[in-house]
Protein backbone atom coordinates (compact mmCIF):
# COMPACT_ATOMS: atom_id res chain seq x y z
CA UNK A 1 0.00 0.00 0.00
CA UNK A 2 1.41 3.46 -0.86
CA UNK A 3 2.91 5.60 1.87
CA UNK A 4 0.39 8.44 1.58
CA UNK A 5 -2.63 6.18 1.97
CA UNK A 6 -1.03 4.64 5.05
CA UNK A 7 -0.52 8.00 6.64
CA UNK A 8 -4.04 9.13 5.87
CA UNK A 9 -5.53 5.91 7.21
CA UNK A 10 -3.72 6.51 10.47
CA UNK A 11 -5.36 9.92 11.03
CA UNK A 12 -7.02 9.50 14.41
CA UNK A 13 -9.14 12.56 15.19
CA UNK A 14 -9.38 11.52 18.85
CA UNK A 15 -5.64 11.07 19.42
CA UNK A 16 -3.78 13.51 21.66
CA UNK A 17 -1.36 14.31 18.81
CA UNK A 18 -4.17 15.30 16.46
CA UNK A 19 -6.05 17.23 19.14
CA UNK A 20 -2.94 19.14 20.17
CA UNK A 21 -2.36 20.31 16.57
CA UNK A 22 -6.08 21.02 16.21
CA UNK A 23 -6.04 23.30 19.28
CA UNK A 24 -3.82 25.73 17.35
CA UNK A 25 -5.19 25.33 13.82
CA UNK A 26 -8.80 25.56 15.04
CA UNK A 27 -7.91 28.69 17.04
CA UNK A 28 -6.26 30.25 13.98
CA UNK A 29 -9.38 29.69 11.93
CA UNK A 30 -11.67 31.03 14.69
CA UNK A 31 -9.45 34.09 15.15
CA UNK A 32 -9.21 34.53 11.35
CA UNK A 33 -12.98 34.58 11.03
CA UNK A 34 -13.26 37.06 13.93
CA UNK A 35 -10.60 39.24 12.32
CA UNK A 36 -12.49 39.07 8.99
CA UNK A 37 -15.74 40.05 10.75
CA UNK A 38 -14.10 43.08 12.36
CA UNK A 39 -12.34 44.08 9.14
CA UNK A 40 -15.57 44.10 7.11
CA UNK A 41 -17.24 46.31 9.71
CA UNK A 42 -14.28 48.72 9.47
CA UNK A 43 -14.51 48.62 5.66
CA UNK A 44 -18.25 49.36 5.85
CA UNK A 45 -17.32 52.60 7.61
CA UNK A 46 -14.74 53.47 4.94
CA UNK A 47 -16.97 52.63 1.95
CA UNK A 48 -20.43 54.14 2.53
CA UNK A 49 -21.60 53.12 -0.99
CA UNK A 50 -20.97 49.44 -0.15
CA UNK A 51 -21.98 49.71 3.50
CA UNK A 52 -24.85 47.21 3.46
CA UNK A 53 -22.96 44.61 1.40
CA UNK A 54 -20.00 44.78 3.77
CA UNK A 55 -22.18 44.41 6.86
CA UNK A 56 -23.70 41.34 5.19
CA UNK A 57 -20.19 39.90 4.69
CA UNK A 58 -19.29 40.62 8.32
CA UNK A 59 -22.34 38.63 9.46
CA UNK A 60 -21.28 35.67 7.31
CA UNK A 61 -17.86 35.79 8.98
CA UNK A 62 -19.36 35.58 12.42
CA UNK A 63 -21.41 32.54 11.31
CA UNK A 64 -18.18 30.97 10.02
CA UNK A 65 -16.58 31.57 13.39
CA UNK A 66 -19.47 29.82 15.17
CA UNK A 67 -19.18 26.87 12.76
CA UNK A 68 -15.49 26.37 13.50
CA UNK A 69 -16.07 26.74 17.24
CA UNK A 70 -18.50 23.83 16.92
CA UNK A 71 -15.79 21.82 15.08
CA UNK A 72 -13.45 22.27 18.06
CA UNK A 73 -16.14 21.31 20.58
CA UNK A 74 -17.01 18.24 18.50
CA UNK A 75 -13.44 16.94 18.91
CA UNK A 76 -13.26 18.01 22.56
CA UNK A 77 -10.53 20.52 21.79
CA UNK A 78 -9.97 23.86 23.53
CA UNK A 79 -8.68 26.38 20.95
CA UNK A 80 -5.43 28.17 21.86
CA UNK A 81 -6.72 31.67 21.15
CA UNK A 82 -3.63 33.39 22.56
CA UNK A 83 -1.47 31.61 19.99
CA UNK A 84 -3.91 32.59 17.23
CA UNK A 85 -3.93 36.29 18.18
CA UNK A 86 -0.16 36.29 17.96
CA UNK A 87 -0.35 34.43 14.63
CA UNK A 88 -2.54 37.16 13.09
CA UNK A 89 -0.79 40.13 14.72
CA UNK A 90 1.22 41.18 11.63
CA UNK A 91 -1.73 41.42 9.26
CA UNK A 92 -3.89 42.82 12.09
CA UNK A 93 -1.45 45.64 12.74
CA UNK A 94 -1.07 46.52 9.06
CA UNK A 95 -4.84 46.55 8.54
CA UNK A 96 -5.38 48.82 11.57
CA UNK A 97 -2.69 51.27 10.43
CA UNK A 98 -4.12 51.40 6.89
CA UNK A 99 -7.68 51.88 8.17
CA UNK A 100 -6.58 54.74 10.45
CA UNK A 101 -5.05 56.44 7.38
CA UNK A 102 -8.17 55.80 5.29
CA UNK A 103 -6.24 53.54 2.90
CA UNK A 104 -9.17 51.51 1.58
CA UNK A 105 -7.10 49.84 -1.16
CA UNK A 106 -4.59 48.45 1.35
CA UNK A 107 -7.42 47.31 3.64
CA UNK A 108 -9.10 45.48 0.75
CA UNK A 109 -5.84 43.85 -0.32
CA UNK A 110 -5.20 42.56 3.21
CA UNK A 111 -8.73 41.32 3.93
CA UNK A 112 -10.43 40.48 0.64
CA UNK A 113 -7.41 39.25 -1.28
CA UNK A 114 -4.76 37.96 1.13
CA UNK A 115 -6.87 36.69 4.04
CA UNK A 116 -9.64 35.29 1.83
CA UNK A 117 -7.15 33.54 -0.52
CA UNK A 118 -5.37 32.11 2.53
CA UNK A 119 -8.71 30.85 3.86
CA UNK A 120 -9.79 29.38 0.50
CA UNK A 121 -6.46 27.55 0.09
CA UNK A 122 -6.52 26.24 3.67
CA UNK A 123 -10.16 25.13 3.57
CA UNK A 124 -9.82 23.40 0.19
CA UNK A 125 -6.79 21.46 1.41
CA UNK A 126 -8.51 20.65 4.71
CA UNK A 127 -11.85 19.35 3.34
CA UNK A 128 -10.59 15.95 2.05
CA UNK A 129 -8.76 15.16 5.33
CA UNK A 130 -11.26 16.62 7.82
CA UNK A 131 -13.50 14.65 10.16
CA UNK A 132 -17.03 14.27 8.77
CA UNK A 133 -18.54 16.99 10.99
CA UNK A 134 -15.86 19.59 10.17
CA UNK A 135 -15.93 18.67 6.48
CA UNK A 136 -19.62 19.59 6.15
CA UNK A 137 -19.09 22.91 7.92
CA UNK A 138 -15.95 23.80 5.95
CA UNK A 139 -17.62 22.98 2.62
CA UNK A 140 -20.37 25.49 3.43
CA UNK A 141 -17.88 28.12 4.56
CA UNK A 142 -15.51 27.94 1.58
CA UNK A 143 -18.33 28.64 -0.90
CA UNK A 144 -18.98 31.94 0.87
CA UNK A 145 -15.27 32.87 0.99
CA UNK A 146 -15.24 32.94 -2.83
CA UNK A 147 -17.92 35.65 -2.71
CA UNK A 148 -15.79 37.68 -0.26
CA UNK A 149 -12.80 37.42 -2.57
CA UNK A 150 -15.08 38.47 -5.42
CA UNK A 151 -16.16 41.62 -3.57
CA UNK A 152 -12.54 42.76 -3.34
CA UNK A 153 -11.81 41.84 -6.96
CA UNK A 154 -14.80 43.76 -8.32
CA UNK A 155 -14.11 46.90 -6.27
CA UNK A 156 -10.39 46.94 -7.07
CA UNK A 157 -11.02 46.28 -10.77
CA UNK A 158 -13.36 49.27 -10.90
CA UNK A 159 -10.70 51.47 -9.27
CA UNK A 160 -7.66 49.80 -10.83
CA UNK A 161 -5.93 52.84 -12.32
CA UNK A 162 -5.93 54.84 -9.08
CA UNK A 163 -5.34 51.75 -6.90
CA UNK A 164 -2.44 50.12 -8.77
CA UNK A 165 0.49 51.80 -7.02
CA UNK A 166 -1.02 51.33 -3.55
CA UNK A 167 -1.78 47.65 -4.32
CA UNK A 168 1.85 47.05 -5.29
CA UNK A 169 3.12 48.60 -2.08
CA UNK A 170 0.56 46.78 0.08
CA UNK A 171 1.47 43.49 -1.63
CA UNK A 172 5.12 44.11 -0.88
CA UNK A 173 4.41 44.78 2.80
CA UNK A 174 1.95 41.95 3.40
CA UNK A 175 2.80 38.97 1.19
CA UNK A 176 6.00 38.14 3.13
CA UNK A 177 3.87 38.00 6.31
CA UNK A 178 1.80 35.22 4.72
CA UNK A 179 4.92 33.08 4.20
CA UNK A 180 5.92 33.60 7.84
CA UNK A 181 2.43 32.54 8.91
CA UNK A 182 2.63 29.41 6.76
CA UNK A 183 5.97 28.48 8.30
CA UNK A 184 4.43 28.73 11.77
CA UNK A 185 1.62 26.26 10.95
CA UNK A 186 3.62 23.87 8.80
CA UNK A 187 4.15 21.29 11.56
CA UNK A 188 0.58 21.30 12.88
CA UNK A 189 -0.85 21.25 9.36
CA UNK A 190 1.33 18.20 8.60
CA UNK A 191 -0.05 16.41 11.68
CA UNK A 192 -3.51 17.01 10.22
CA UNK A 193 -2.39 15.60 6.81
CA UNK A 194 -2.15 19.00 5.09
CA UNK A 195 1.12 19.72 3.31
CA UNK A 196 2.73 23.16 3.19
CA UNK A 197 3.58 22.82 -0.51
CA UNK A 198 -0.07 22.25 -1.36
CA UNK A 199 -1.12 25.26 0.77
CA UNK A 200 1.46 27.51 -0.93
CA UNK A 201 0.46 26.28 -4.38
CA UNK A 202 -3.26 26.75 -3.79
CA UNK A 203 -2.72 30.18 -2.26
CA UNK A 204 -0.58 31.40 -5.17
CA UNK A 205 -3.12 30.14 -7.72
CA UNK A 206 -6.03 31.94 -5.97
CA UNK A 207 -4.04 35.11 -5.38
CA UNK A 208 -2.60 35.22 -8.91
CA UNK A 209 -6.05 34.70 -10.40
CA UNK A 210 -7.43 37.50 -8.24
CA UNK A 211 -4.67 39.89 -9.36
CA UNK A 212 -5.37 38.96 -12.97
CA UNK A 213 -9.13 39.59 -12.56
CA UNK A 214 -8.37 43.03 -11.09
CA UNK A 215 -6.32 44.00 -14.14
CA UNK A 216 -2.67 43.10 -13.51
CA UNK A 217 -0.76 41.57 -16.44
CA UNK A 218 1.02 38.20 -16.18
CA UNK A 219 4.30 40.10 -16.02
CA UNK A 220 2.99 42.22 -13.11
CA UNK A 221 1.75 39.11 -11.30
CA UNK A 222 5.17 37.43 -11.58
CA UNK A 223 6.80 40.53 -10.16
CA UNK A 224 4.25 40.89 -7.34
CA UNK A 225 4.61 37.21 -6.39
CA UNK A 226 8.40 37.46 -6.34
CA UNK A 227 8.26 40.48 -4.02
CA UNK A 228 6.50 38.21 -1.56
CA UNK A 229 9.69 36.19 -1.26
CA UNK A 230 11.71 39.20 -0.11
CA UNK A 231 11.59 40.10 3.58
CA UNK A 232 8.88 42.62 4.62
C1 LIG B 1 -11.87 34.66 6.16
O1 LIG B 1 -13.21 34.63 6.02
C2 LIG B 1 -11.38 33.75 7.22
C3 LIG B 1 -9.93 33.75 7.43
C4 LIG B 1 -9.39 32.52 8.06
C5 LIG B 1 -7.95 32.30 7.75
C6 LIG B 1 -7.53 30.91 7.98
C7 LIG B 1 -6.09 30.62 7.69
C8 LIG B 1 -5.76 29.23 8.07
C9 LIG B 1 -4.35 28.81 7.89
C10 LIG B 1 -4.06 27.54 8.58
C11 LIG B 1 -3.79 26.37 7.70
C12 LIG B 1 -4.53 25.15 8.07
C13 LIG B 1 -5.93 25.04 7.54
C14 LIG B 1 -6.91 24.34 8.40
C15 LIG B 1 -8.33 24.54 7.97
C16 LIG B 1 -9.32 24.26 9.06
FE1 LIG C 1 -15.04 33.44 6.62
FE1 LIG D 1 -14.38 35.58 4.30
Image: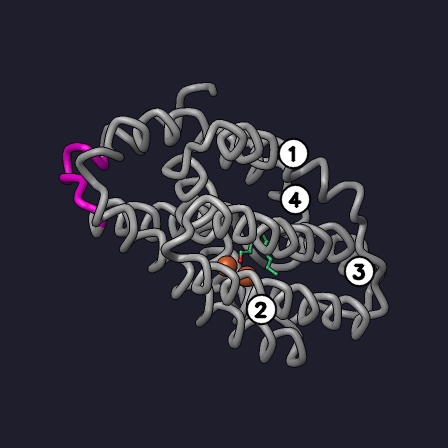
Image depth: mark 1 or mark 4 in front: 1
Helix, strand, or loop for circle 4?
A: helix
Q: Is mark 2 within 8 Å of ligand 1?
A: no
Residue at which label 3 appears:
19
Q: Earlier in the sequence, mark 3 or mark 4?
A: 3
Mark 1–mark 3 Cα distance, whole angstroms, equals 24 Å
Q: Earlier in the sequence, mark 2 or mark 1?
A: 1
| Front residue of this view, candidates 117 and 56 | 56
Q: Which residues are magenta?
A: 214-221
Helix, strand, or loop for circle 3?
A: helix
**Do the numbered discs 2 and 1 sit on residues whose CB atoms are within 8 Å?**
no
Mark 2–mark 1 Cα distance, whole angstroms, equals 28 Å
User: Which numbered disc covers residue 129?
Assistant: 2
- Which of the 4 quarters of the picture holds residue 173? top left
Q: Earlier in the sequence, mark 2 or mark 4?
A: 2
Residue occupying the point 39% across, 65% down: 147
Amino acid sequence: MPQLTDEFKELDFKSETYKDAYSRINAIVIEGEQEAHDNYITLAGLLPESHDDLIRLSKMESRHKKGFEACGRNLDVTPDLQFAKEFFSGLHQNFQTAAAEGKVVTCLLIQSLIIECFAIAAYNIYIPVADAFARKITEGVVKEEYSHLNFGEVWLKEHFTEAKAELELANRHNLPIVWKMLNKVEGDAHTMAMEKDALVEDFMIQYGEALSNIGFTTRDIMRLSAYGLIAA
